[in-house]
Image (cartoon, grey):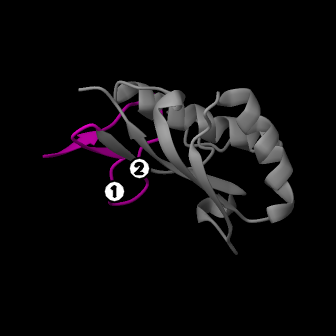
Amino acid sequence: MKKPISTNKAPAAIGPYSQAIQWGDVVFISGQVAFIPGSGELNNNTFEDEVNQVIDNLDAICKEAGGGLDNILKLSIFLTDLSNFDAVNNLMKERFSEPFPARSTIEVSRLPKDVNIEMDAILSIEI
């Protein structure tokens, strides 16, 4: 059965979608950008700030679902500038532990609110 997951520790959806959906022991997290929860403002002073906020938002949803970043099986990263690839890799090494999730990194022409990065994730939790 499809179960919505939501938390006020991550930004509310800005459209007709759920923060995450659980199906059995699998959770699908919608794309996260660098909104600061509760404020509606972007944390985009630097690219690193933006990436860390996105990861914080993912982590909050993972925790609400009963897991954490280490439960992420697959991570999709959308960048507006692929020259930021190395910066993302460095922050991934700081924020995630091995074994790292499977990952796709895709350059796109534009993202909502003109952010530089968006991530979505699939995780597995114990039920």
Q: Is residue 47 visible?
A: no
Q: Main secondary structure of the magenta part?
A: loop
Q: How far across and how far down the image is residue 89, in percent?
A: 78, 44
Q: Is residue 67 left or right of residue 59?
A: left
The residue under the point 72% across, 57% down is 116
Magenta stretch, residue numbers: 1-25
Residue beneath label 2, please?
13
The residue under the point 64% across, 30% down is 98
- What amino acid type should be assigned to the residue bearing mark 1? Tyr
Vertical relation: 118 (above or below) 58: below
The residue under the point 30% across, 26% down is 126
Residue beneath label 1, please?
17
Badge 2 local density, few (<14 within 10 Å), some, or many (20+)?
some
Helix, strand or loop status at disc 1: loop
Vertical relation: 16 (above or below) 27: below
- What amino acid type should be assigned to the residue bearing mark 2? Ala
